[in-house]
């Protein structure tokens, strides 16, 4: 194509979350060589810090929420119909019409979708009109585990389906065989934020020799926050006093945890943040003891790797693909068999190993920096663009 490709990145919201951050990062990187539009679907407040940090002015942000009068009218109409017990979503009606309008207005060449709500909207509204590349960030694994298959009806309408790990690819093939179109693996990538002249340790009076375990994630119980806390407290009980646990994430649940462990001065709750690199840079070890049956990728694990931090994470989903490459390993993988007490013990053992085995810690730290190079946003974007070109060239020919 002689002109720049016009790409619409479609996602759930501009908020904290692996799929959301990935969509914003991909939009930013693709905008270097293409005209990129970013459409989000949910009526959720934008995270101004993330938007400012990740999305350059070249990317045009679109949503029903940004059209205040239309958004208000859609919400009021939706509420009225609900009050009248009419089972029809006025908000979805306006949202899908706006999506189709923007695709026509900006003459979009290809759509890249990054959440279930977005996937369904794009596949139903744009099928037969524009090529649609759906990216599964792991949400379908959870739905499959819950016994639902309803999403297959709209995923069949996608031009291709990107999965963020080989684990996810195998899962979908095992479940659906050849029912779903053109499955291919493209690993997620991140935009690395450089933190210059600003130290979390110094700002909080934490000595250089204090060993910091840290965790960054969404503030939901299933990410394993309580596991991290209980494992850390066991470590302290066993005599490892010169330690801190830093928990980076915000939600009502995190506020409850903070209140429950308010007497533990060695645990720091940061609340929601827009730039976790500021904290990760001063971690010794990154944690992700997730309780989800399958983490498709674990984007925060990549953030740990880029800062050269060894990782203790659950041996599930696509996480092993991030932490291990052949004989090169940048962390310890811990099985979760369903017993949380045993899991706490196993995470504690992994923590203890890093504290007493400095050689292993240094080895995994060096490996982390090496493995991180597989997950740059530049490499991720390059793979997406190759896929887009292949799809568009096939249509043209």
Image (cartoon, grey):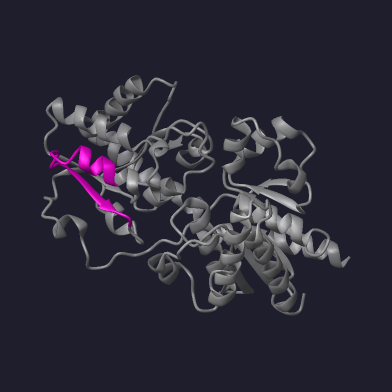
Residue nearest the viewer, comparing 132 with 239: 132
Left-right relation of 49 to 146: left
Left-right relation of 159 to 383: right
Residue 170 lies, in percent from the top left, at 66, 34
- Residue drawn at (65%, 61%), measured in percent from left and top? 90
| Residue 390 visible in the current orientation | no
Residue 367 lies, in percent from the top left, at 39, 43
* Residue segment shown in magenta: 255-272
Q: In which quarter of the image is residue 224?
A: top left
The extreme right residue here reads 397
- Residue drawn at (65%, 64%), measured in percent from left and top? 95
Residue 247 lies, in percent from the top left, at 28, 46
| Residue 115 visible in the current orientation | yes
**Quadrant in which the C terminus is drawn:** bottom right
Q: Quadrant of residue 285?
A: top left
Q: In this view, does 203 lie above or below 253?
A: below
Residue nearest the viewer, comparing 158 with 365: 158
């Amino acid at each position: 194509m002689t002109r720049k490709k016009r790409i619409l990145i479609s996602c759930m919201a501009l908020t904290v979350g692996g799929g959301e951050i990935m969509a914003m990062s991909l939009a930013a990187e693709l905008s270097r060589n293409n005209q990129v539009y970013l459409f989000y679907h949910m009526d959720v407040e934008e995270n101004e810090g993330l938007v400012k940090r990740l999305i350059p002015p070249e990317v045009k942000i679109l949503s029903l929420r940004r059209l205040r009068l239309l958004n208000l009218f859609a919400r009021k109409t939706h509420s009225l119909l609900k009050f009248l017990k009419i089972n029809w979503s006025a908000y979805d009606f306006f949202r899908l019409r706006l999506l189709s309008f923007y695709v026509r207005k900006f003459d979009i060449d290809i759509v890249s979708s990054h959440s279930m709500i977005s996937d369904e909207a794009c596949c139903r509204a744009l099928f037969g009109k524009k090529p649609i590349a759906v990216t599964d960030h792991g949400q379908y694994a959870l739905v499959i585990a819950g016994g639902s298959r309803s999403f297959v009806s709209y995923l069949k309408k996608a031009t291709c389906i990107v999965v963020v790990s080989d684990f996810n690819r195998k899962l979908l093939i095992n479940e659906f065989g050849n029912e779903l179109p053109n499955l291919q693996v493209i690993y997620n990538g991140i935009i690395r934020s450089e933190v210059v002249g600003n130290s979390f340790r110094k700002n909080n009076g934490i000595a250089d020799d204090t060993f910091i375990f840290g965790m960054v994630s969404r503030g939901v119980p299933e990410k394993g926050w309580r596991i991290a806390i209980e494992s850390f407290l066991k470590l302290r009980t066993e005599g490892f006093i010169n330690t801190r646990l830093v928990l980076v994430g915000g939600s009502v649940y995190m506020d409850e945890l903070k209140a429950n462990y308010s007497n533990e001065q060695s645990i720091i709750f940061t609340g929601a943040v827009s730039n976790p690199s500021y904290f990760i840079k001063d971690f010794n070890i990154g944690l992700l003891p997730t309780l989800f049956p399958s983490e498709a990728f674990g984007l925060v694990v990549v953030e740990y790797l880029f800062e050269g931090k060894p990782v203790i994470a659950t041996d599930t989903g696509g996480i092993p693909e991030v932490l291990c490459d052949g004989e090169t390993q940048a962390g310890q993988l811990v099985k979760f068999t369903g017993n949380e007490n045993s899991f706490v013990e196993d995470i504690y053992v992994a923590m203890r190993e890093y504290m007493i085995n400095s050689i292993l810690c240094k080895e995994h730290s060096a490996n982390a920096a090496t493995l991180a190079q597989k997950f740059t946003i530049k490499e991720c974007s390059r793979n997406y663009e190759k896929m887009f070109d292949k799809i568009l060239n096939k249509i043209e020919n």
